[in-house]
Image (cartoon, grey):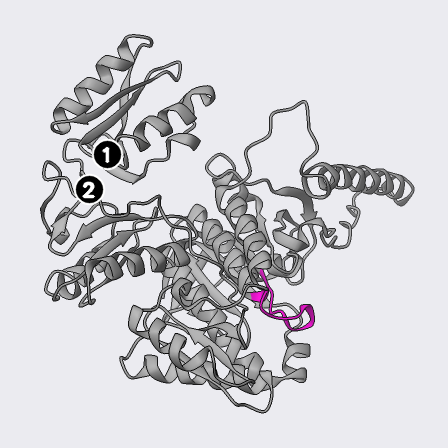
Amino acid sequence: MKRKIAAILAADVFGYSKLVAEDEEETLRRLASYRAVFEDFITRGSGRVFNTAGDAILAEFPSAVEAVRCAIDVQESLRTRNLAYPASRQMTFRIGISIGDVVERDGDLLGDGVNIAARLEGLAQPGGLCVSRAVWEQVANKMSVQFADIGEQEVKNIPTPVHAYMLSLGADAAATPKQAPARKPSPKQPRDIAWPIAIIAASVAVLVVAGILYFVVLHPGREHRAARAPEAPAVAAAERRAQAVAARQAEPVVPETIPLIGERERGAIKTNYMSAPDHKALAISPYRAGFTSGQKDDETAKTAAMDSCQRALDTINSKARCELYAVGNTVVYARGRPPMPPEPWMIRDPAIERPFSAKDLPLINDDARTSIENRYAQARLSKALALSPRGVPFFYVGQPDLDEAVRRALEHCGTMSGVACLLVALDDNLVVPIPTTMKPVGLFHAAANPLITPQLQDEVARRLGNAASGWNAVAVGASGHPGLALKAANEQAATEGALADCAKQDRDCRVIAIGPFAVEPL
């Protein structure tokens, strides 16, 4: 047995028994689909699923930040998917996260860290998460999310109270957090003193929690004199996607705008689906689509379309999942249109391009690098590779033309990551400037970069957007004044130019971006 400290994520389905009682087959199918979403985000966060008993999911992470980020991303993704279902059939998860000592035995984890995470999950709101104080301390200054402090909570089978923090997301954000029973008075205190103290303490605690909930949860838009952290970009993006989805779900199907699928499948849908009789449905995935028509009712059509799509995926041994796109000629797709970068998507610059090599790709992990070397580098044309802000690659190979390869790579990446992605490779060429003198640590977003004076962020973003070719660099000084070098001939000229421009109006300047990447010293 191996003992270690780990961040533990525990999740289960709220109201699972009721969902199963109403429709067991559909619930189990959707549970498998939603678990795949969990596993995808857990893997991206360098985590590992170690138990999936019943409707529960238990995972470990080396970092509390990655565990919380994964939880937020999962809840956003599932909330968007749930928009395709009536409220009574929506499948929502509660998530608890703790840091603690665990023992690993045959791949499973045991110990207080696991037990506390499971109890915190029971305190979370459906669609939200609840974390221990140790987790909150790790993420408080690293993520722009606002947790409500709900104080010490008595939880089952844990001898000492657990100080907990709650984050409610989406439609459940205005719900009142659960309150566990108040702590019992210490036996060392006389009864006639302990009771008044307990009553006063409980009253104060209720007022404090109520105040926090009023200002943080129930009235998030109210102005405060104290400075507030900005809304989490991921949460804000999810809200925008949800609004877009709600607006789009009454739209008619337009084959030319269906995301992810190839032009040949779009043509088949236009020819064989659009004029087909009801009841009919269409399902899509990143690699295949499936549809049916002439069914006895919409529910039968939905099931048949999903089955058709999944069978098509099985023929290519894909682990992707199908999602319902349309019922009849009306869009019901839960994800909406994927976020895409500004056009033109393909910018060819001989001064930047160089032969493709997987070892030169920044941000990606070793497993992704190996996959790219085996599956992209050796594949036939046409092909394109896009990179998400977290360094997750998405690529399509053997496409009819480069336009289709680019569109599908960017759509797939945008769909899965929730933000516009970066096109890094076209056919056998790298097409973005990749720094070698500094280490890329992410994609650079000037309009939200806290190192740049807020009043100048949009101007920096605008100037960078107008300089889409050549080598660009951004430096910033101690007071937040930026310096830019645009369309330089090479990396060295760009960094030197940015530092010189910054030094004209600030001191202690340093380079923070080269090309599309945020950078730090090697």
Along the line of sight, the residue nearer the viewer: 51 or 439: 439
From the viewer's side, name the closer residue of 118 and 420.
Answer: 420
Whether 521 is drawn above or below 173: the answer is above
Q: Residue at coordinates 56% horizontally, 87% vertically from top-left? A: 300
Left or right of 481? Residue 53 is right
Q: Is residue 264 above or below residue 427?
A: below
Alpha carbons under labels 2 and 1: distance apart: 7 Å
Evaluate if marks 2 and 1 touch, with contact meaning CB atoms under 8 Å apart. yes
Measured from the top left, where is residue 294 in percent x and y? 52, 90
Could you tell me which quadrant the N terminus lies in?
bottom left
**Hey, what amino acid is under mark 1?**
Gly
The reply to whether residue 109 is visible in this rendering is: no
Q: Which residue is mark 2?
A: 432
Magenta span: 82-94
**Which of the 4 image quarters holds residue 228?**
top right
Residue found at x 53% / y 54%: 97
Vertically, is 136 above or below 489?
A: below
The tag on residue 515 is 1
Which quadrant would the C terminus be assigned to in this image? top left
Q: Earlier in the sequence, mark 2 or mark 1?
A: 2
Q: Residue furthest right?
A: 192
Residue 277 appears in the picture as rendered: yes
